[in-house]
Amino acid sequence: MSDDALSMVLGALVRLEGNLTKVQDDLTALRIDTMARLGRHENHLTSIRDDISVAMGQTDHMRRIHDTTREVVRGLSDRADESGKA
C-alpha cells in the first residue's frame, strides 16, 4: 500500500472518529433534553391527577349531602304520613 493510500485511510479514520464523537455528544444532549421533557410531562400528569382527585372528592361530598337530604326528606314524609293517620 502506498503512503498516499495509507494517509487517506488514516485521514478517513480520524474524520470518522471525530464524527462518532459528535454523534455521541448529540445523543447525550438528546437524552438530557428528553429526560427534561419527560419530567415536565410527569409534572403535568401529576397536576391533572391531583385535579381529578379534588373533583372526585367534591363529588363524593356532594353525594353524601344529597343522600343525607334525601333521608331527611324521607323521614319528614314518614312523620307527615304518621301524623295524618293519627
Image: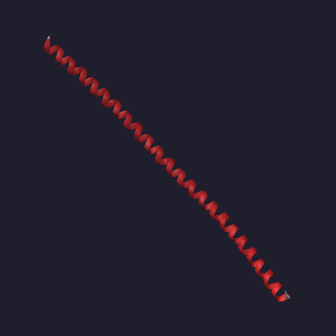
Q: Position of residue 42 (x, y in %)?
A: 54, 51
Residue 56's place in the image compared with 1, above or below, is above
Q: Quadrant of the N terminus?
A: bottom right
Q: Position of residue 33 (x, y in %)?
A: 61, 61
- Picture residue at 69% right of the left edge, 67% below the top: 25
Residue 39's place in the image compared with 11, above or below, is above
Q: Which quarter of the figure has residue 35? A: bottom right
- Picture residue at 53% right of the left edge, 54% below the top: 41
Q: Camera-side residue: 26 or 70?
A: 26
- Picture residue at 56% right of the left edge, 58% below the top: 37
Q: Camera-side residue: 51 or 27?
A: 27
Q: Position of residue 12 (x, y in %)?
A: 76, 81
Q: Is residue 72 left or right of residue 55?
A: left
Q: Quadrant of the C terminus?
A: top left
Going by the picture, which residue comes out furthest to the top? 86
Q: Is residue 51 left or right of residue 22?
A: left
Residue 16's place in the image compared with 6, above or below, is above
Q: Position of residue 6 (x, y in %)?
A: 83, 84
